[in-house]
Image (cartoon, grey):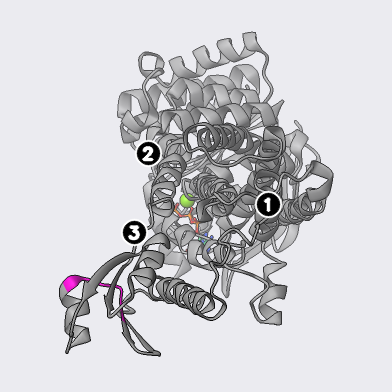
Amino acid sequence: MNQAISIQNVNKSFGKKNVLKDIKFEIMEGKIYGFIGPSGAGKTTLIKMIVGMDIPDTGSIYLLGEKMPNLNVLQQIGYMAQSDALYKELTGKENLMFFASLYQLNKKERKNRIEYAAKLVNLTADLNKKVSAYSGGMRRRLSLAIALIQNPKILILDEPTVGIDPELKLSIWNELLRLKNEEGKTIIVTTHVMDEADKCDVISMVREGSLIATGTPEQLKEKYSAQSLDEVFLAAGRKDQ
Amino acid sequence: MRTLALIKRILLQIVRDKRTLALLFIAPLLILTLMNLVFNGKTVEPALGVENGSPQLIESLKESEIIVHEYEDISDVEKAILKDNLTGFLQIEGTETKLTLLNDDPTAAKSIEMKVKQVISKELQLQVMGMKPNNDSIQTNYIYGSKDTQLFDTFSPILIGFFVFFFVFLISGIGLLNERTTGTLERLMATPIRRGEIVAAYLIGYGLLAIIQTIIVVLFSINILDINLVGSFWNVILINIVVAIVALSLGILLSSFASSEFQMVQFIPLVIVPQIFFSGIFSIEGMADWLQVLAKIMPLYYAANALKGVMYKGLSLSEISYNLYVLLAFAFVFIILNLFALKRYRKL
Ligand SMILES: Nc1ncnc2c1ncn2[C@@H]1O[C@H](COP(=O)(O)OP(=O)(O)OP(=O)(O)O)[C@@H](O)[C@H]1O
Ligand SMILES: [Mg+2]
């Protein structure tokens, strides 16, 4: 199995606040990785750095063997931000179209991928509505569709299922698992929902800018002698203090 | 072509935003029309009260477009002026002449004072030499314009340049600012787009709008407002396109120092208003030396020079090309700075 992402001794501060402390981490191809941890722990900051939107103060990040930021690698990354960044004056379809052109898909690919992504997030019927008329959940779903638009090798999703109803959440997770199993995609998610974390192959707990524990859900439960990930989360917090 | 996709999106967003479209295309026309009406208002003939004037003198005064009210034995001049709404009052007692001016409007006061002095000195000449002076003894020639030139004719080229600058600056600046505040600019950094492509798309997208705006404004000014255009129409368009590029690159540059639309608007008194003072609406030659130097760093100074040169003086492109080069240099510097300003997101 190949390494998809390698994070080497990454530090990041905002002003005096040290947000990421000496993060070292490897991510293998074809697995789902979950980052969990309390609000403000530094998950989003780490993810932005993996995508290359932000630069580490020290240390480096490699994706698919290339040092980030790298424009060719970005072609292979589907990113969904924690806060939706959409063009509200445009329709859902126009948003998808715009991002598809940024990834330079040809006309036929564009059509197919827009159809696929919209169907996956159940937005096909609302594609011609302006985003300003979308509900919060619909915007979230459109953001997810955009992350999938160019059929990327790596998916990086920052709290992808916030504001999405349980039924759709389940079908999105089924699709993520299918993408991993059938198409060998590498997927990184952050989440506060422990039963989602349970579906990941590897979980990393982030706390105050450090990775305090990494392993499969079973390994973590064993380590903290807990029944559920919720208990792991709480136990890790307690131990930390 | 990522730039193309971005341009398409920018134009689509603007087209959806009817208010902004109106601001870009209709607001300059409204303001120009209004200014045209204000500046081209007819001058009212001033009213002058006269006591003891000879019929000869009164005739001469009337010839110089003064409305004459004759009075006899006035004790309180001030009261008469206020009561009869006069601009001035002329009293003649033998060789003594006394002029009292209302002076609520210094321009009106100065103008009537000059006219009265002229008439009186003519009268004296007549008495002394016993001959009628020739009214047409001075023949006036004009290098630029004609005797019908109005203040607005020299203003209007500057105003056209100003409006192109102002509206393009504001709208492009707020355009990129929106992209920043909604997080979409950061989101773009997660796609394989280059910083240069973003800057280019903004320049081209808003540049296209600016070209349309310029053509509308210039056509409207010349055909409907009847503003003088001595030089070539195409040169006017060319100058305005260059002005628009400067405004665009400055607008999107300053938007990186603003974190809200309100802060963008705060740049207007800092960046736009001073440029009006140095654009030639007020005489630059009369300013202190150091102020004149300041004028030279204002893009609008060069824009105004070029536009006035072509529209009013009828200069050719080569005669105003210096101004265009300076403007292009401004644009070049701003564009480079823009690339640096985006660097805070990503190095590529
Ligand atoms: N641009 C920034 N400037 C200053 N501080 C920042 C900035 N971005 C993040 N931080 C700080 O970094 C810390 C980590 O933030 P981050 O967004 O990574 O948390 P998170 O783990 O994603 O939290 P959540 O689960 O709430 O999304 C927080 O304390 C936050 O205040
Ligand atoms: Mg976060």
- Cβ atoms at labels 2 and 3 below 8 Å apart: no
The residue carrying mark 3 is: B44
Give how far across and how far down residue B53 sits, in percent. 31, 77
Q: Is residue A233 visible?
A: yes
What's the CA distance linking mark 2 and mark 3?
Answer: 72 Å
Q: Is residue A49 visible?
A: no
The mark lying in front, picked from 2 and 3, is: 3
Residue in front for this viewpoint, A65 or B67: B67
* Relative vertical location of residue B99 with respect to residue A196 in this rendering, above or below: below
The residue that disc 1 covers is: B144
Q: Is residue B184 above or below residue A153?
A: below
Please indicate whether residue B12 sits to the left or right of residue B211 in the image.
left
Q: The residue tagged with tag 3: helix, strand or loop?
A: loop
Residue A54 — which label? Answer: none
Rendered location of residue A8, percent (x, y): 74, 55
Query: Which residue does the numbered mark 2 point to in the structure image?
Result: A162
Chain of the residue displaying label 3: B
Separation (CA) of disc 3 from disc 1:
26 Å
Q: Which residues are magenta?
A: B84-90
